[in-house]
Amino acid sequence: MMKRRKYKVTIAYDGSSYSGWQYQENAIGIQQVVEEALAYLEGGPVRVFGSSRTDAGVHAKGFVGHFHLTKPIPPKNLVRATNSRLPDAVRVMKASYAKESFDARLSAKGKEYRYQLYQSDIMPPHLAPYWTFCHRPLDLDAMRRAASFFVGRHDFVSFAANPNRELETTVRNIFSFEVRRSGPRHTFVVRGDGFLYKQVRSMVGFLISVGKGNERPEAVRELLEAKAPRTARVETAPPRGLFLWKVFY
């Protein structure tokens, strides 16, 4: 019997046409197309375990997965061979052998997400799949102040959607939350130990409301302290602007 080897891969993808990472019965997820490409190389089923779930339409620059192969394929060859079987929207960026103790999800110490917003009178068409458009002026200082209230260990139940599954806790630790601007391009950069279902898009959606002047920056602190389930007051930003940027181990 051939010895199985464990691999760690970093995957980038354009999620525009996919239902997210997770395999689904009635839609195509990134997990499915990656597993199909690896199954061709392996000559049998391969299960890929991902670092997290991503929603339909969300992108990734640094998604991480792990899996086992019985065929001894060097990591550099694995990258080239897998990419030759993948659609253009999905790419294995790098691969390495992994220790048996490594788990793409459980070994993660934190994640960085970036949300991209284009504020102008006109959205350049080539940016449309990856940037959310806003024609209204935004108060950068107010958004930065609001973002600062998210930093720390809080109960984020007010900024998450119901995942339709049991959760041990809705408490998460946000390490940092920056709002960067370069001309019309606004980038929201958030790092934390983990995120709830639609948490990043909910936080960004609320910051955009603050930027428009519809909410006060201090309202973030008030909602966190209230620890009440999310209401329509907290809008969910569209998925196309969101990237899973990096996973930390």
Image (cartoon, grey):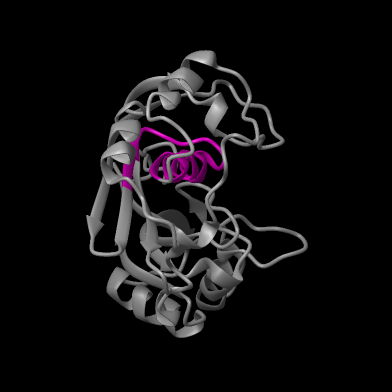
- The furthest residue to the left: 182
Magenta region: which residues? 189-211
Q: Is residue 98 visible?
A: no
Choose top left, top right, bottom left or bottom right for residue 213.
Answer: top left
Q: How many marks?
A: 0
Residue 179 in picture, x, y percent from top left: 28, 46
Quadrant containing the C terminus in the rendered view:
top left
> In the figure, is residue 202 to the left or right of 75?
right
Residue 10 in picture, x, y percent from top left: 36, 61
Q: Is residue 143 visible?
A: yes
Q: Nearer the viewer, residue 5 or 105?
A: 105
Q: Nearer the viewer, residue 126 or 200?
A: 126
On screen, residue 131 above or below 105:
below
Task: Check residue 56 for magenta coloring.
Answer: no
Residue 61 in picture, x, y percent from top left: 36, 62
- The furthest residue to the right: 26
Q: Nearer the viewer, residue 189 or 166?
A: 189
On screen, residue 66 above or below 39:
above
Question: What residue is drawn where x is 39% and y is 24%?
Answer: 218
Task: Check residue 200 for magenta coloring.
Answer: yes
Choose top left, top right, bottom left or bottom right for residue 8.
Answer: bottom left
Question: What residue is drawn where x is 62% and y is 64%?
Answer: 29
Question: What residue is drawn where x is 38% and y is 59%?
Answer: 116
Residue 200 in picture, x, y percent from top left: 46, 42
Choose top left, top right, bottom left or bottom right for residue 207.
Answer: top left
Question: What residue is drawn where x is 54% and y is 56%?
Answer: 238
- The furthest residue to the bottom: 84
